[in-house]
Amino acid sequence: MAEERTVTKSNPFQGTWTLFDKDIKGWYKSYASLFIALVQPIVWLALYGKAIDYTAIFSSGSFNIPGVNLSKQVLDSLGSQFIMSTFGTSDYFSFLTTGMLAFIVLFGAVFSGINLVFERRGGFLSKVITTPVSRSVIVTSKVLSAVAKSLVQAAMLLIVGIVLGMQLSHLSVPGIVETFAALSLLAIGMASAFMMTALRTTNWQLQLAIMNFISLPLLFASNALFPIKFMPLWMQYIARANPMSYAADAARQLLLGSPGMVSLQLDFAFLFAFALAFLLIGWVLSQRFLSR
Amino acid sequence: MERIGSKLEQPLKLDQKAVIEVIHLSKTFGQKIKAVDDVSFSVYEGEIFGFLGPNGAGKTTTINMLTTQIVPSSGSALIAGYDIRKRPNEVRKRISVVLQNNTADEELTGRENAQVIANLYGVPRAESSRLVEGILNLVELGDAADRLVRGYSGGMRRRLEIAIGLISRPKILFLDEPTLGLDTQTREAIWAYVKTLRDKYSTTVFLTTHLMEEADRICDRIAIIDRGKIVKIGTPAEIKRVVGNDVIEFTLDSESDEVTRAVAEYVGAKVERTGEDYRVKVDKGEEAIPSIIELLASKGYLVKKVSLSKPSLSEAYLELTGRAFREADQEAVQTARMISLFS
């Protein structure tokens, strides 16, 4: 036997990595869940993205003004003017793909909470909270694993988008890297927020209800699917407070070169503040509430 | 075994250091349910301390508070000198817990589970894989180490929990019903290892169990808790004294009141006689028997038969908690309900 070692030292980085690794392992070792996670972006983009095609509405042959004989050329340029002024890019599919990046990150991040609930129910959490890892390490590892999973999905979604005909003229490596930085901030904030709702409960049904209750409204009240300038004013206020809008806006500016809702700097500042604030609140609450 | 047996009879040394000091500890759930009610006691370094009590007496709640899983309603405790309320992280660095429920992750292998916990205790990687291997072998899970816990039997899961609890080689080890559902061989192996830990590293062990025979044999001291309050604390021998001393019964070749008087005078206790059968209560039966036989022989009596019965911890426990009949009543009610359900 080795020498006496009765006072253990806990290294927060080792602790975070261990719990993060355990979470991710559980994910990729289950081929079914990995498969679903990777196929989901394809299904969403292929079905929703191709079904709702505002671009098609404004292409020649789809509309005409009776009694006025406009040439095909005029109609086409009118149509593309409509699309450009509405969506800030030449087609709705590109607009939607960039919005869906924020959407899929949100849907990945919301699982941080339910993951915690299941670890409590399974007993693993009650063991972990008796070890020297701090409560904030537990929360951080869960947030990071949710971030990693949702970024993998976002990468998949971007690839599918490119394959299915997204605008490529503005695409650049720095743009993609910065987009994923913005998406990470969104994921950190969202995962922390959903973690808070799960700090004490063993009620997974409630947690699922919370996920459903919050995530879809967050999607609708943002610019992810549709530009906010056409929304009623009250909804515009909500959309402008919604971090989803800033992530989608950053992605559009960086990947499509669209004119932004706000400046790129403001997008990042907002997302950074959101991520930091919710992570810190999560840490503070976990000290108090993360218990058996 | 002998070492412990002899230790039981010794009074606690005064220089022993308290590693667990429980001070007016209480936990109330909701408005009314007082799970633990103003409990104070100390556990000394290197002790194997048993915490016994009926279901719902407050054993697990106490362990959960001492191991910083839940926060006390009032009072506190010092673990290795650190307050469980003010310095929980320092407490966690010095303890390890084997909980009553299984905590291993079903989707990981036994080895992966043990490795995760070793990492959380900051055991260096180079050391931990060897440590994990050794400890899994100890609980005879070496062959199953790389199988998913999902496929483990109940006994295997229990053994894994115990292995994981031992991995950090803690200063204080909390065991909540650790051997429940284990076979005798595994139980013996685990207790032998726990004793090794104690002897080698003066690990203090705080355990709850329902097995009285086990508690009697393993524990240096025992506290009996009932309805959130400690009703008795002491060495197993002290606890057993609640139901009286050892009983010696012997049969002579004749009836004699002289014997009754002489033996009573010698042991300092009353001797009852029924015909040729005599009955006397003494402190240490094994030691008293030879001298009684000698005394009788010197007076010319022949002892034909002798027996010694010692009070069991179970008897003392039932006496102290008085639950035997209450639980039996409940069972009767339950049976009655079942019958009415099916008829």
Image (tube, rainbow, N blue to C red):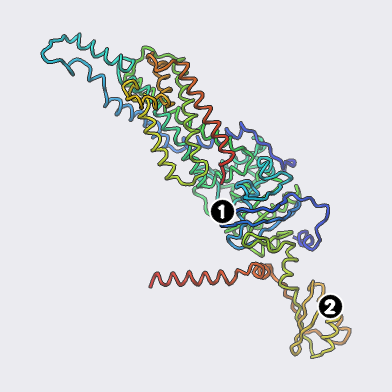
Tell me if mark 1 has few (under 14), some (14-19) or many (20+) residues whose alpha carbon lies within 10 angstroms of its own.
Answer: few
| Looking at the image, residue B138 lies above or below residue A101 | below
> Which of A192/A8 is in front?
A192
Q: Secondary structure at mark 1?
A: strand
Q: Which mark is residue B267?
A: 2
Q: Quadrant of the C terminus of chain B?
A: bottom left
| Looking at the image, residue A260 lies above or below residue B296 | above
> Which of B68/A289 is in front?
A289
Q: Is residue B265 visible?
A: yes
> Quarter of the image holding residue B37?
bottom right
Q: Earlier in the sequence, mark 1 or mark 2?
A: 1
| Looking at the image, residue A5 lies above or below residue B248 | above
> Which of B158/B320 is in front?
B320
Which chain's residue wears label 1?
Answer: B
**Picture coordinates of residue B255 (x, y %)?**
79, 91
**Picture coordinates of residue B137 (x, y %)?**
63, 48
Residue farthest toward the left in the current orientation of the protein: A67
Q: Which residue is mark 1?
A: B29
Q: Is residue A274 left or right of residue B287?
A: left
Picture residue at 53% right of the left edge, 72% below the top: B329
